[in-house]
Image (cartoon, rainbow, N blue to C red):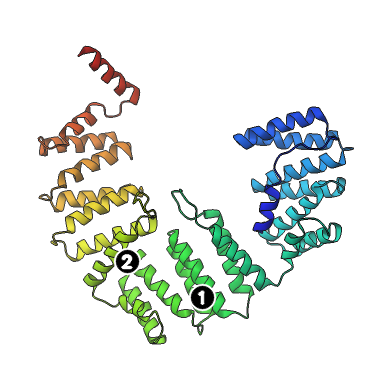
Amino acid sequence: MRIFVILFISLGFMISCNSVNKEYAAEIETLEKNVEANPTPENTLALVQKYEDYAKNHSSDKEWSGRYLYRAATIYYRSRNYAKALETINKVLTNFKSSEGAPNALLLKGNIYDEKLFNEEEAGKAYQQFLDDYPNHEGKTTAEFFFKPLKEKLTIQIADLEGELYQENARTRINPSVSSQLRRKYSDYAEKVTDDPEGGVGYLVKSAKLMGEMSNFTGALQTLDRAADKYPEANGMADVLLAKAEIFEDDLGDEPKAREAANSFIEKFPNHPKVEEARFFLKPANEKLAIKIADLEAKVYQDSLGTRLDPRLAQQLINKYVQAADLKPKSPETASNLYKAGEIARSIRNFPKALELWARVYEDYPSYEKAPQSLFLQGYIHENDFKNLERAEEIYNKFLKQYPSHDLADDVQFSLKFLGKPADEIIKSFEGKKEGE
């Protein structure tokens, strides 16, 4: 439950009670600051051990022994050691129930059983005990949330997770941890909220699209098939069929299956507002490709500066460039599009695909102005990305033999001269050259 996670993480590491043993408190505070500034397995383990030592050696200090053990439990929780977290929580509840750490420990116990171990019965016991023992505690809202009607609770949790799904300034825009939680909530809604078939199919479509964004196309199609089996008469089936058509066409390059899904959509939902989207998949291949390429080129960058590619859209654009090249290999823009596809492939670190594309440009379009660059870049990938120096040397020598007067010839000669040498050696050679001038 996201509300609870915020609650117990925000407690922080603060010493404010005069009853705590000063020597231990100082040592713990130092460790806490170290963990907060630079958490490592070693200093985190040392901190947990110090918490547990305090409780063992100062059991008469009920307040701080309970608080410290609760903090230890939260660290076990964050490291996903739920068995150890529960063991530590039970020590708090058994031996230090009067501590301020006890109610928070109960909330953490409920959260672990509910969100991590999926044991609703034990979660309910923990939350009910919290409400019975601490009716005026600030965590009351969290405990009461567990007992809301399932439909209301799942709707709130889903909205909360959807708000956290996308992360800024990250290579992978989707937060994988949030995605996993969200897909489970979608599934829970579809399985357990039996009076809302449209909501259920809608959430399964969202789950499939989320899998698609993470390039799990097999899982996405399985989820869509599950939605079709469970809700064959729902209006939301239109979105199921459209999503299947998009995955088959855009991600898997399976045009026949995309057309099959689109035809099924049109047959079942001829007056649906999205019927024109379905008809798109029935257009001639060259017409579809031109439209799709233009659309992807406009959308492929995640940011307005055009510096960060969306990995899924980038792969789709590569696929469309290749499909267009296969369809019209002699088209004037084919070589340029294949070259761009190679650049995109390397940008998303699909190095084998980049090599394949640049090799195709070099071999099939020798008169294209960037054919030499296509050869050079193959050597560059072997040198810098695959660390295959023998193959890189072979390609670089081939470049010099074929394009001795090209603008890149000096760069290639430089690469050959220092191939495989460490950076400090390259720097020293420059310094030596400068001194001799």
Residue 255 % position (x, y) = 31, 71
- Crowding near pointer 2: few (<14 within 10 Å), some, many (20+)? some
Q: Is residue 311 visible?
A: yes
Q: Tell me which amino acid carries mark 2.
A: Gly
- The amino acid type found where label 1 is placed reads Ala
Q: Nearer the viewer, residue 390 or 212?
A: 212
Q: Is 353 displayed left or right of 310 in the figure?
A: left
Residue position for label 1 = 227
Distance, label 1 to label 2, CA atoms, is: 23 Å
Compared with residue 203, is residue 400 higher up or lower down, i.e. above or below? Answer: above
Q: Is residue 315 left or right of residue 223?
A: left
Q: Quadrant of the C terminus?
A: top left
Residue at 31% over, 76% down: 280
Query: Looking at the picture, does residue 255 appear above or below residue 414?
Result: below
In the drawing, does residue 181 fall left or right of residue 169? right
Is any atom of residue 40 visible in this view? Answer: no
Q: Residue at x 86, y 49 (%)?
A: 97
Query: Residues at badges 1 and 2 in contact (C-beta under 8 Å)?
Result: no
The image shows residue 308, relative to residue 293, as above or below, that is: above
Q: Can you give x and y, in whole percent of width and height, for residue 243 in the image? A: 42, 72
Q: Nearer the viewer, residue 357 or 186?
A: 186
* Residue at which label 2 appears: 253
SS state under label 2? loop
Q: Which of the two discs, 1 and 2, labels the residue nearer the N terminus? A: 1
Query: Which residue sits at x=63%, y=75%?
Result: 193
Residue 160 higher or lower than 276, as above or below:
above
Neighbor class of circle 1 (other Cα within 10 Å; few <14, some 14-19, many 20+) is: many
Give whichever of 230, 208 is nearer the camera.
208
Check the picture and name the quadrant holding the N terminus. bottom right
Q: What residue do we see at 12% from left, 37% from top? A: 406
Residue 181 placement: quadrant? bottom right
